[in-house]
Amino acid sequence: MAKKSNNRGPHGVVVIDKPAGWTSHDVVAKSRGVLGTRKVGHSGTLDPDATGVLVLGVGNATRLLRYLTPLPKSYQGEIVLGTETSTLDASGEVTATHDMTGIAAADVEAAAAALTGELMQIPPMVSAIKIDGKRLHQLAREGIEVERPPRPVTVTRFDIEPGSDSNVWRCSVDCSSGTYVRSLAADLGTALGGGAHLRALRRTSVGGFSLSDAGTIENPTLLPIEAAVGHLESAAVDEPTAVAVGHGRLLSIDALGVVGPGPWAVLGDTGQLLAVYEAHKGASKPALVIPTNVIRPDGGSVSPS
């Protein structure tokens, strides 16, 4: 049996359809009260004005957030050509305007296509990235702008179509974790010889979690802890191996019965998550071991406490 704990839960994954006006921290703080536990964290910040999928780890699942954070994301939003803002989105102050009324649809589509693939993206000043130990948005509030090194991101889809007004374009974006869609919007405006900002951003998915999985802050649905590692390769082990896993022992790749580079979700005979193992010197070692005697969700809504 895997390592035991007297931690009585709840434990699992919660997918929230975040409303506008809430920070990701606000959602976590509120969810702690709703779920009745301090052990709640999120897998990736969503801007306060943005809406949509925010994935939370609850209880022992907070230890698995490291495997959720790198998942790819999908977004929908609107890009307003001709107006630049201090935050690159609608929440900032207008910093420049451009006459972009004569731009052809083919030019906009071509510019969007050029912003797909492997890119080097400069993070916006209003972001949670740390430079010399201080978050960029804190520096921005102090009126300080610092040089930000570009970071590699991947944009696999940047579809764009005309919106309700001549200067507004609807966009759909699939991208790697760490991609700023508002930076994409600003870069699109620059590529077209002017400027732009993003508005009405909505995150539609994080990895395999979509809006169809999402509940509200007040009425969340707790998914099993296994949902946090559903995207990992898995290994089902027998009882003797489960005992070794529970004690955090190193295992050979053959004993674990896995292929590929890892990490691997190690499951017991009933499909319960026992641990996550990673490659180590030609063998495998536990990155973390999950206690087994915890309250497991039944898939229904969690009542506020």
Image: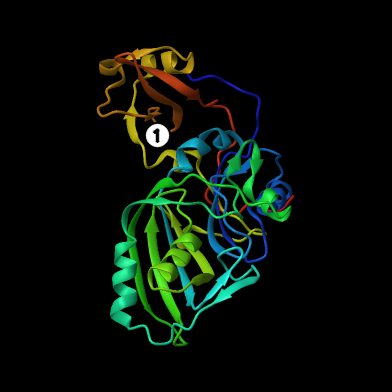
Lateral position of residue 103 relative to residue 292, left or right: left
Q: How many marks?
A: 1
Q: Residue at x 40, y 32 (%)?
A: 270
Nearest to the observer: residue 6 or residue 279: 279
Query: Which quadrant of the figure has residue 96?
Result: bottom right
Reply above or below: 195 against 177.
below
In this view, 11 is above or below 302: above
Q: Which residue is mark 1?
A: 271
Pick the residue in front: 59 or 202: 202
**Amino acid type, mark 1:** Gly
Q: Camera-side residue: 283 or 133? A: 133
Residue occupying the point 47% across, 15% down: 248
Which element is circle 1 on?
Answer: loop
- For the question of whether residue 207 can be seen, the reply is no
Relative to 297, does residue 186 appear above or below in the rendering? below
In depth, the one of 82 and 31 nearer the eye is 82
Which x, y percent locates residue 117? 30, 54
Residue 283 horizontal/vertical position (percent): 32, 15
Q: Position of residue 236 (x, y in %)?
A: 33, 28
Colour scheme of the picture? rainbow
Task: Classify 10 Å Cα crowding around label 1: few (below 14), some (14-19), many (20 and above).
Answer: few
Q: Is residue 13 visible?
A: yes
Question: Percent position (x, y) of residue 252?
Answer: 30, 13
In the rendered structure, the answer to whether residue 150 lies left or right of residue 280 reads right
Residue 228 vs 268, above or below: the answer is below
Q: Is residue 118 left or right of residue 58?
A: left
Question: Could you tell whether 173 is left or right of 59 in the image?
Answer: left
